[in-house]
Image (cartoon, rainbow, N blue to C red):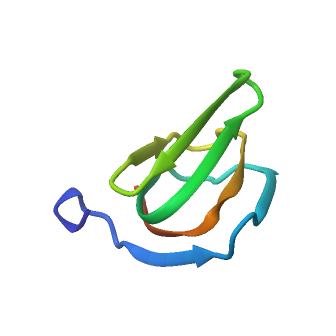
């Protein structure tokens, strides 16, 4: 991520934690390190379940929600 010019940081959530739909003003890059999380894209009618090793590139201002899996989640994230 550093090679891409990102300043990554780690975050985590307990099992089954839910984020309500929201946006970010910058492009978000996220890797799942441990556990799983499902991102919902309500405006597109899509969802994406991610597990360890998966990457998500989320363009700025994309409405999304998230639901952490039963084992919790640890992610590495940075913004462009």
Q: Residue at x 32, y 65 (%)?
A: 6
Residue 69: x %, y % from top left: 64, 58
Location of residue 70 with respect to 47 vertically, above or below: below
Location of residue 41 with respect to 44 vertically, above or below: below
Observer-nearest of 78 and 80: 78
Where is the N terminus found, in terms of image quarters? bottom left
Q: How many marks?
A: 0
Observer-nearest of 3 and 18: 18
Observer-nearest of 23 and 25: 23
Q: Farthest residue in the front direction?
A: 70
Residue 63: x %, y % from top left: 72, 40
| Image side of residue 37 versus residue 80, left or right | right
Q: Farthest residue in the top direction?
A: 44
Residue 50: x %, y % from top left: 49, 47
Observer-nearest of 35 and 11: 35
Residue 25: x %, y % from top left: 62, 53
Where is the C terminus found, in terms of image quarters? bottom left
Q: Residue at x 44, y 45 (%)?
A: 56
Q: Quadrant of residue 68?
A: bottom right
Q: Residue at x 77, y 30 (%)?
A: 42
Location of residue 27 with respect to 1 vertically, above or below: above
| Image side of residue 48 versus residue 29, left or right | right
| Image side of residue 7 versus residue 5, left or right | right
Q: Quadrant of residue 44?
A: top right
Q: Farthest residue in the right direction?
A: 20
């Amino acid at each position: 991520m550093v090679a891409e010019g990102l300043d990554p940081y780690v975050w985590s959530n307990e099992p089954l934690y839910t984020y309500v739909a929201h946006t970010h003003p910058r492009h978000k890059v996220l890797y799942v390190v441990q556990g799983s999380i499902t991102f919902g894209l309500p405006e597109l009618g899509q969802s994406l379940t991610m597990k360890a090793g998966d990457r998500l590139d989320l363009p700025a201002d994309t409405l999304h929600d998230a639901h952490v899996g039963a084992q919790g989640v640890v992610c590495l994230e940075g913004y462009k």
